[in-house]
Amino acid sequence: MKTLSALAEDALEYLYMREVEDDTSATPTPDDRTVGELERHALVHPGGLSLTPAGRVEAEQAVRRHRLAERLLQDVIAMRGAQVNEAACEFEHSLHHGVDEYICTLLGHPTTCPHGRPIPPGRCCRERKGASHAAIVTLAAMKAGERGAIAYLSSRQPDVVQKLMALGVLPGSPVSMVQTFPSAVFQVGQTQIAVDHTLAEDIFVRRAGA
């Protein structure tokens, strides 16, 4: 397929959020030129701004690139706030030709963006290629004695996140793995914390030296 314009990719993202994720706040307002581009590539139905099956596939990839860009900018480059989304809108259009898979592997195959929205999985997520070289991994993947810093918490349970944060499990906090079995025990500051495997999968750590 011919490379789409940035405006066309943005329109696909809005359509995906509205049609697939039922996000009513996502209201696409592409101009006639952008609509015409999408129609020429058979990504939307003629006369109506709705995704075709091919359009849904392309839109899912556009959403994936955007949310991976957000994850990279926040977790690796340490950008914060509205700045993350603004920069991601520019950066995402460069993540073609397998670059998105490289970044996904680097980040340890994250499942959500910084706003808690799901990141559609790619081929690399299903095959887990190069996972052992990931710069950011789950706490569950760390070995005893390994060190790093908390990157982010992906749990969708606010009470769990608040409890962890109250214990000092905050982005940027140094962490060291004490033991991995029968429960994951790690140290943050002067505090040792034990969590089960499920919760350890929701704590992401940037490996030391990564």
Image: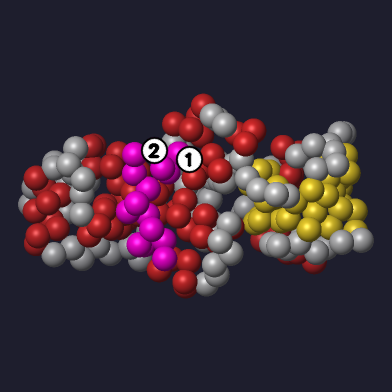
Is residue 78 one of those drawn in magenta? no
| Residue closest to the eye, 103 or 68 | 103
Q: Secondary structure at mark 2?
A: loop
Position of 86 compared to 14: left or right?
right
- Residue 50 seen from this side: no
* Residue stretch in magenta: 87-102
Residue linked to disc 1? 102
Residue extending farthest front: 209
Task: Write the residue at 75% across / 39% down.
Answer: 142
* Quarter of the rendering containing residue 183: top right
For the question of whether residue 57 can be seen, the reply is yes
Say which residue label 2 marks. Answer: 98
Question: Left or right of 19: which side holds 3?
Answer: left
Q: Position of residue 188 (x, y in %)?
A: 84, 58
Give the percent coordinates (x, y) of residue 149. Answer: 73, 55
Task: Specify the farthest residue to the top.
Answer: 127
Amino acid identity at mark 2: Gly
Q: Residue at x 42, y 65 (%)?
A: 87
